[in-house]
Image (tube, rainbow, N blue to C red):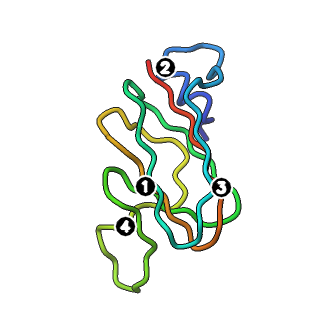
């Protein structure tokens, strides 16, 4: 298993793990209501954490909660932890119940 610190450190060229981010954002999601976060200029990596509910995330498109037993290509992904966001404008979040989202951005 690859530790998260190793992945981030390798990307950022750090040998001692990730330093605390200076671009930190938090929000409380209201159930079934999408909320967007603009990605800061120069950010390349987002580390995302969630508390309180299942959270779906989409990139440059509004997140939606799956409602069908048929697979579709839209809507987002549930609970990602680390993503490359260097070419994106915003992230969208949605949860089936109230939840907290915390996002730390990093750049090289």
Marks 1 and 4: which is nearer the front? 1
Task: Categorize mark 2 by other alpha carbons within 10 Å: few (<14), some (14-19), many (20+).
Answer: some
Q: Is residue 49 left or right of residue 82?
A: right
Report the disc number at residue 61.
none
- Quarter of the picture holding the N terminus: top right
Q: Quadrant of residue 52?
A: bottom right
Q: CA distance from mark 1 to mark 2?
A: 25 Å
Q: Residue at 41% x, 49% y: name it.
A: 91
N-terminal-most mark, 1 or 2 = 2
Q: Position of residue 29 (x, y in %)?
A: 59, 61
Give the residue number, with chain letter if any, for mark 3: 100
Identify the element where label 3 is drawn: strand
Give the residue number, with chain letter if any, for mark 4: 75
Q: Is residue 63 left or right of residue 61?
A: right
Q: Residue at 45% x, 41% y: name it.
A: 83
Give the residue number, with chain letter if any, for mark 2: 12
């Amino acid at each position: 298993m690859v530790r998260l610190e190793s992945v981030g450190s390798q990307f950022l060229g750090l040998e001692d793990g990730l330093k605390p981010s200076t671009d930190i954002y938090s929000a409380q999601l209201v159930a079934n209501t999408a909320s967007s976060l603009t990605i800061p200029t120069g950010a390349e990596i987002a580390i995302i954490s969630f508390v309180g509910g299942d959270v779906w995330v989409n990139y440059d498109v509004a997140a939606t909660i799956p409602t069908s037993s048929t697979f579709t290509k839209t809507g987002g992904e549930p609970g990602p932890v680390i993503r490359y966001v260097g070419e994106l404008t915003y992230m969208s979040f949605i949860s089936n119940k109230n939840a907290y989202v915390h996002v730390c951005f990093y750049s090289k």
